[in-house]
Amino acid sequence: MKKGKTIAAIILTAAAAAARIMVEQRKEDLIIEKGISGYRTWASTSTALLIAAAALAAILLILQFSDAARKRREEEAAGRLAAEAAEKSPRAPLSVDGVMNPGEIRNFLIQQGSGEWRKYRGNLGQCVDVMDDMSDCRARLHKLLEMNGADTLRDTEDVLRQVEQYICRNMRKIINNLSAVDIDSPDSEPKIQKWFSECISDSMQKLDKVNEFIVSLSEFFNSQGEDSSSLDMLDIYKGTILESIARE
């Protein structure tokens, strides 16, 4: 509605400007026909009309821009509120087919350990420690490759990514199982403890293999040009890790 009024005011301003121009163009004719006083009346009337129309158009334009700015601020505020609400709401990115985000799963476990699942805060803390250890392994491997300029061995990082996703799947089992049972029921306690035990034990076994793999890689770098068997040992560790993941 305001936009239509603004357009009408702009058209009126243009018409008033045209009338004022026409009065000036016919100045001599008007003086002859109407006299000096008649011309002045026409000139002052057309000028007043032009000023009034321009003022009206300016006011409507200001109101329109102000309204648009207000709506934009409201939309931005609503977007910020929605983003804040999403951040405060714990969510678990449990992708069935895609790649899971370890950081988001870790944060979810921490949030739940202080919230709905605080009864099992200690167990959830162990799960977080496992994920932190996995992240530390990836960082150490990356640093080792960087320091030795081992671009040809970048595929070793993919091995650790696969292990990390395997551990994420273990955490997904914990999260789904805890969501499916009444955690306050005494009957659920033995099952829940068993789930945590299996998850942490299995994940730690994979981490042990990863640590052995990183040590083996370090030995390979140290023995370059001296011991040709180091690369074979590295391949054996890679194969063992990937095979253990594939079996699960």
Image (cartoon, rainbow, N blue to C red):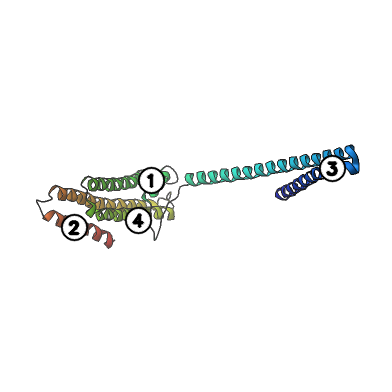
Q: Which residue is drawn at 39% across and 47% down?
A: 109
Q: Residue 246 carries which label?
A: none
Question: Left or right: 178 with respect to 51?
Answer: left
Amino acid carrying mark 2 in the image: Asp
Q: Which residue is drawn at 74% across and 40% down?
A: 55
Mark 2 / mark 4, whichever is N-terminal: 4
Residues at discs 1 and 4 in contact (Cβ within 8 Å) = no
State how far apart marks 3 and 1 are (Cα): 97 Å
Give the residue pinned by disc 1: 120
Give the residue pinned by disc 4: 169
For residue 187, say whether it is visible.
Answer: no
Q: Where is residue 116 in the image (x, y as percent from the top left)?
A: 45, 46
Mark 4 / mark 3, whichever is N-terminal: 3
Mark 1 / mark 4, whichever is N-terminal: 1
Q: Position of residue 71 (x, y in %)?
A: 62, 45
Looking at the rendered image, the disc whose residue lies closer to the viewer, 4 or 3, is: 3
Mark 3: give few (<14), some (14-19) or many (20+) Cα within 10 Å: some
| Quarter of the rendering containing residue 242 | bottom left
Amino acid carrying mark 1 in the image: Tyr
Q: Looking at this view, is 93 or 114 the one in front?
A: 93
Give the residue pinned by disc 3: 28
